[in-house]
Amino acid sequence: MINQVLNNRYRIVRVLGSGTSGLIYLAADNRHPDFPVCVIRQLKLPKRNSQALARLQFLLDRKSEALERLAQDNQSPEILDFFIEDQKFYLVEEFVPGHPINAPRDSNPLQVEDQGVVRLEEMLEILGSKPVSEWNQSPRQVIPQELDIDSESLQSQSLPNSHRIRHKREPRKLLWLILTGGAILLVLVGLVVIFQSQSQVKAKALYNQGVEKLKQGDLQGAIKDFNQAIRLNPNDAAVYGNRGNAHYDLGAYKAAIEDYNKMIQLDPKNAGAYYNRGLARYELEDWQGTVEDLNQLIRLQPTDGDAYYKRGVAHYELGNYEAAIEDLNQAIRFNPEDAKAYASRGLARAATGNRQQAMADYTKAIALDPKDATAYYSRGRARFLLGDYEGAVEDYNRSIDLDPKDADAYTNRCSARLNLGAYKDAIADCTQSIELNPNSDTAYNNRCIAYFNLKQYEDALKDCSQAIRIAPTNDTAYSNRGDVRRELGDKQGSLEDYTQAIRLNPNNSVAYSNRGDARRDLDDDRGALQDYTEAIRINPKNPFAFYGRALTNVALGNKSEAIEDFQEASRLFLDSGRIGGYNDAQFQLKKLRN
């Protein structure tokens, strides 16, 4: 009988016991959204009493009236429904914890009345009909049952004769105590089972309610329902998972991770739990944790392209560029139309120095998703690093059209325009970047360079100083401010700025080269020669260091060394497209050779 559905509505959860005319069940109401439990009493229909059958038909014909009048009577437990099925009459009552299944008779507390029969008689009396006498049988003790049983096996036995009562008084008393204790124990066990069953039904209803709120965007309401469901049933993995999803959507990533931890503990093979925890760790920039979770997911679902993509991004953030490329290759194999996978692989390839392949990936990403501002931005950076400043500006233009609030795109376009000599346009871009992000030291530094090239030295000094205030460890800003101070005649100030730049970054070739210029201005030729030589050691392709060292060698009378340095400076200036520097170096060579 367990899980059988009566009247297409009531699913039997457990047998509670029996009355004189049938079994008593605990059942769940499947038509109610909360699946409340109720008590159903079974009464076998009389077979040879036409009058009793007529009374039942009378009751069924007036069902609505009967239920309404019973509700007005305010009796507890309340009668909720009644019906006939398979030649049995069923009476549905509300479940009241602690309420006895059958009440004891006043005359004998060890004997009880069948409450099903009593309630049926009450209904008939309320409607003005006579009771059904065939159900007025002798009462008997109710023994709670654990399993479904045949009611015929519970018939009362006749009492033993008097002399046997006297002769067996002590054993019979002991037997009664044992039976009573067993019955109490069974009742307690039954009540625990009933409570647990009711809790699980309520927990399921709260879970479903929380899921609906989650779908509707009521995240706090969903969490409240999930909290209650967990209190009633702390072993349902799905509840923890969905509460984790609600926390994730609220940005409470640590709370989400705690829920996913519990879900994985209850359901270690749930691939979605690992994926969601990986996403939460991703948001917290816990890249190693992200990789570990996605390792588990890929082990469970080795064809999940999105998992490979996310793990590839995490590897990239960890600096594991080759591993990132391998994962992104897999992501593209499973999802060949995934634009973001191509764009991310482009970043990883660029990080390994493979800029041409990176360009190809960015171009593919743009072909798949022409509205991806990030892909245009990344390709613009690749073009900039390849020296294609016009191409970089074109890509930054498109990126800004798609995302006009991206401060970094304006800053980078400013850099490209600086290299094109479009200083006023560069100033406009950096100014726009600063309006979007007032704390961008790079934007202030780049605008400083633009002002410097326009010989607006006071404006340049202000911007470089502001860049340093925002980022006191920006060695490039110190080096640029040294250039500005040198043009303003502050030779000692410029020397101090270059020295600070070197202190912050001992591998800054430009800072060494610039400090060499400052020392030459102060007639410290030996110190200048040392700085230029160190600059060349750090970066053998620094044309300014060769040119400055050549001038210093001229001052020291080292003509042959000066000619060699001017020749190398000419070649490097020409290779980098700096025609002005090339012409200067050629002029100095002609002077030395004449």
Image: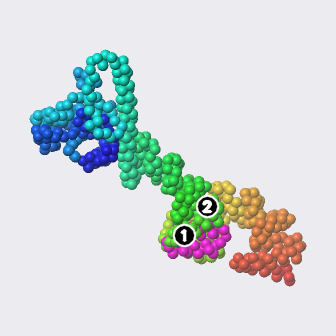
Task: Provide the secondary structure element on which disc 1 rests.
Answer: helix
Residue 222 place in picture, x, y as percent? 40, 48
Residue with the most extreme bottom position: 594
Q: Position of residue 437 (x, y in %)?
A: 55, 59
Distance from the alpha carbon under mark 2 to that under mark 1: 16 Å
Residue 11 place in picture, x, y as percent: 30, 46
Query: Who comes first in sequence, dot 2 or dot 1?
Result: 2
Residue corresponding to mark 1: 332
Main secondary structure type of the part rendered in magenta: helix
**Quadrant location, the N terminus:** top left
Residue at the spot 70% in from the left edge and 76% down from the top edge:
576
> Quarter of the image holding residue 283?
bottom right
Name the side, left or right, on which 254 lies relative to 578. Answer: left
- Using the image as rendered, state which of residue 426 and residue 213 is in the foreground: 213
Magenta span: 342-369
Residue on which the image places disc 2: 315
Looking at the picture, which amino acid does disc 1 mark? Ile
